[in-house]
Amino acid sequence: MAEQSEHQRRAYELLGVLLARAAREDLPVIAWTMSSAQSEPILAGHCDAVDPIQRQDDFEAWRSALGAEAWPNGIKQDYGIRLHASVADQEARVTVTLAAEIRNDEM
């Protein structure tokens, strides 16, 4: 339990850093969730703009800003494509993931 609390605290602190950076660098607003149940904390950003082009642009803006590595061509699923990228923040010891879903009918 103490380890999970520590994971959550580190992810929370990194989220504060990222939100401050977003304001300074005019990065798009995206949804964030934290997971502390893994062996290391995960901070997950989800690009959920209504417009699919904006969703992709938001994903790319954050991916580029974080230097996150994207899965080539996304993850193909029955309903469409899930864009996914991740990067490990070595200082905070938190993995940051980004995702955006593009449905077949939006392509």
Image: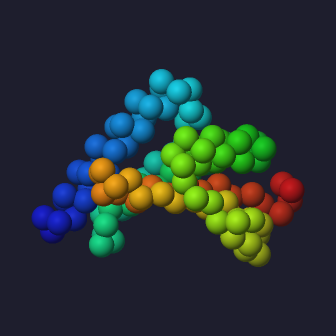
Q: Residue at x 42, y 58 (%)?
A: 88
Classify residue 42 as left or right of residue 61.
left
Name which quarter of the figure residue 100 lies in: bottom right
Colour scheme used in the picture?
A: rainbow
Q: Position of residue 49 (x, y in %)?
A: 67, 42
| Residue 76 picture location, percent across and down | 74, 72
Check the picture and name the quadrant holding the C terminus: bottom right
Residue 51 image-quadrant placement:
top right
Residue that appears at 48% across and 57% down: 87
Observer able to see residue 35: yes
Image location (x, y in percent) of residue 29 = 55, 36
Q: Nearer the viewer, residue 38 or 31?
A: 38
Q: Dividing the image into 4 quarters, which one contains the N terminus?
A: bottom left
Q: Quadrant of residue 99?
A: bottom right
Q: Which residue is painted at 59% across and 48% down in the image?
A: 63
Instruction: Note whether 27 is above or below 70 in the view shown.
Output: above
Name the foreground residue: 74 vs 87. Answer: 87
* Left or right: 11 as drawn, with respect to 19: left
The image shows residue 81, relative to residue 43, as above or below, that is below
Residue 62 shown left or right of residue 82 in the figure: left
Q: Is residue 34 visible?
A: no
